[in-house]
Amino acid sequence: MKRLLLCVITAAGLAVLGGEANARSAYDGSWDLVFVTQSGGCDPSYNFTVNISNGIVSHPNLVKFRGYVARSGAVRASVTVHDKHAGGSGRLSGNSGRGTWRGYSGNERCAGYWSARRS
């Protein structure tokens, strides 16, 4: 259950909803993410990799996932897997980024921050 929440939280941290996806985004490529839980009963930290292509953030194992990177580098995402949901936002700049996330699994609430590095 916590593994599934990991996927949900991770994906949420790096996807973007605030702007329209741009072809050949400056942020395209593979990104390594670290998610740190600051509150709630989730694991203390998670490591994860996502891909950005044409400004769209994706991960091969997540079905209900929505995320885009705006031209400005602003990121926002959300993902739902069964009774688990997470959402996050932040900013990419050059080869790194950071932001915050919030999520839930059933009645358990979690929140924290994420950081990213281009792979």
Image: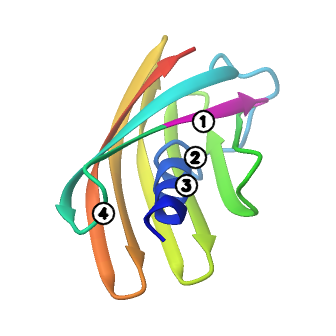
Q: Earlier in the sequence, mark 4 or mark 3?
A: 3
Disc 2: CA contacts within 10 A as few (<14), some (14-19) or many (>=20): many
Residue beneath label 3, please? 7
Q: Label 2 near label 1: C-beta < 8 Å?
A: yes
Residue at mark 3 to residue at mark 1: CA–CA distance: 22 Å
Q: Amino acid at mark 3?
A: Cys
Seen at 42% across and 86% down, the residue is 106
Furthest residue in direction bottom, as rendered:
107
> How far across and down, in percent of the image, does residue 98 sit?
35, 32
Q: Amino acid at mark 2?
A: Val
Disc ID at residue 47: none
In this picture, residue 31 sits left or right of residue 29: left
In this picture, residue 55 sits left or right of residue 48: right
Seen at 67% across and 57% down, the residue is 66
Magenta span of residues? 48-54
Residue at mark 3 to residue at mark 2: CA–CA distance: 16 Å
Give the SS element for disc 3: helix
Q: Label 3 near label 4: C-beta < 8 Å?
A: no
> How far across and down, in percent of the image, does residue 60 sit?
77, 46
Residue at mark 4 to residue at mark 3: CA–CA distance: 12 Å
Q: Is residue 69 above or below residue 107?
A: above
In this picture, residue 58 sits left or right of residue 48: right
